[in-house]
Image (cartoon, rainbow, N blue to C red):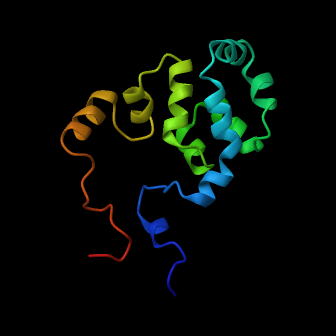
Amino acid sequence: MALEKPYQNIPGTTVFDADMSRKGYHLNQFCMSLIKAENRARFLADERVYVDEWPMSEEQKLAVLARDYNKCIANGANIYFLAKLFYTDKTPFERGVSTMTNMGPEEYRLMMLGGGRSIEGNRYIGEK
């Protein structure tokens, strides 16, 4: 049986498509709110109170509070929106993204400078 979305079958990859966009809409809007300094200050003053102002699922809220970026992505976050959360925490983008891998920031940086992750082991499952 063919998958409705064959790209869901790529190891270690979550594709941000229309369904993920809908799933993460409020999570991404929360992240966008952090563009404003006053919102960053309010969030950092009481994170739980601030996330409760947003109609996110409890799983999304807990992922934000734990800074579990992989769980945020699995719940519809887009990396470009998550960058606002990195900035709020004074975390460089490279460091924030490296926490989503099994690499440290320097190893991640070198991998990206070397052209990104290898295609070996990162194709559609079943593809040669």
Does residue 29 sit above or below 19 in this rendering? above
40 relative to 90 in the view: left or right: right
| Residue 5 in the image, given as x and y percentages of width and height | 51, 72
Query: Which image quarter holds the C terminus?
Result: bottom left
- At horizontal 45% and vertical 67% (from top left) the residue drawn is 7
Q: Residue at x 72, y 36 (%)?
A: 61
Residue appearing at x 66%, y 27% in the figure = 33
Q: Is residue 39 left or right of residue 3?
A: right
Residue 68 percent coordinates (x, y): 57, 36
Outermost residue to the left: 114
73 above or below 82?
A: below
Residue 48, position as x, y percentages in the image? 76, 25
| Quadrant of the image occupied by residue 121 | bottom left
Residue drawn at point x = 37 percent, y = 70 percent: 124
Q: Residue furthest front?
A: 36
Residue 22 vs residue 107, the one in the foreground: 22
Residue 42: quadrant of the picture: top right
Q: Is residue 128 left or right of residue 19?
A: left
